[in-house]
Amino acid sequence: MPAKRSGDPAFGRALESARQGSPAGFEWLWRRFARQVTAFARVRGSDDPDGITNDVFLATFQRIDQFTGDEDAFVALLFTIARNKVIDEHRQRGRRPVTTALDPTAERTGGNTEDEALAGLGFGTRELLLQLTDDQREVLILRLVADLSLEQTAAITGRTVNATKALQHRAVNALRRKSSVEAVTK
């Protein structure tokens, strides 16, 4: 279960510094939370998780002087914005025409970071997650990849804590059933 983040004096100092327009405050907040936001966007299927992360922090920093709350509230704000940005990206993707690369045989530089991230979670994790409902997958990603509490996950997804807990429980049971069936059939 993720630990509550509140009470970190460095967060309070960085937030106050950012409110005053100090680049050091913004940088501390970015370094502390950007990796989690990027991982969330990547696992949620974003075509541009780094761009989503940039957009999330830009939106947050533009209104940082209006933010009130502790570190947990700040994290919930970041992931609420990230969730909405990913949803917007998926909607826009559905409206865009399908494009193909000019040279499909050209060698790509670098690896597929989404596949590498999911591979780090264990063999077949991506396939298992894709078998869950969108709601189940979203709750597990927020809880496990983003390391958010039940309360934060509930706030971000617009559910009660009990509904979030039940959804997480059903998702874990579904994964357990699917992985045990696959183990038996191999």
Image (cartoon, rainbow, N blue to C red):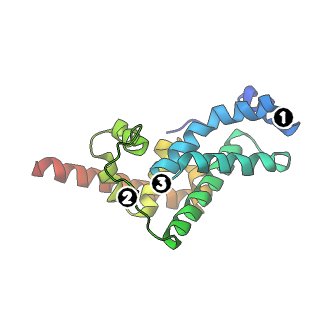
Q: Is residue 155 above or below residue 70?
A: below
Q: CA distance from mark 1 to mark 2?
A: 40 Å
Kind of residue at disc 2: Arg
State the residue in front, 106 or 182: 106
SS of the residue under disc 1: helix
Instruction: Tell me the kind of residue under disc 1.
Output: Glu
Q: Position of residue 36 (x, y in %)?
A: 56, 40
List x then y, in percent, for residue 151. Answer: 60, 50
Q: From the viewer's perspective, is the residue at label 1 or at label 3 nearer?
A: 3
Residue 121 shows up from this direction: yes
Give the residue number, with chain letter if any, for mark 1.
16
Classify 10 Å Cα crowding around label 2: few (below 14), some (14-19), many (20 and above).
Answer: some
Question: Which picture quadrant has residue 130?
Answer: bottom left
Which residue does the numbered mark 3 point to in the structure image? Answer: 44
Image coordinates of residue 179 in percent, x first then y, are 23, 49
Question: Mark 1 or mark 2, which has the lower sequence index?
Answer: 1
Dot 1: within a 10 Å radius of its alpha carbon, few (fewer than 14), some, or many (20 or more) residues? some
- From the image, state whether disc 3 or disc 2 is nearer to you: 3
| CA gap, disc 3 and disc 2 | 19 Å
First reached walking from the N terminus: tag 1 or tag 3: 1
Which of the numbered marks, if any, corresponds to residue 170? 2
Expressed as whole percent of the image width and height from the top left, the position of residue 2 reads 53, 38
Left or right: 158 with respect to 117? right
Could you tell me which residue is drawn at 50 percent across and 46 percent down?
A: 143
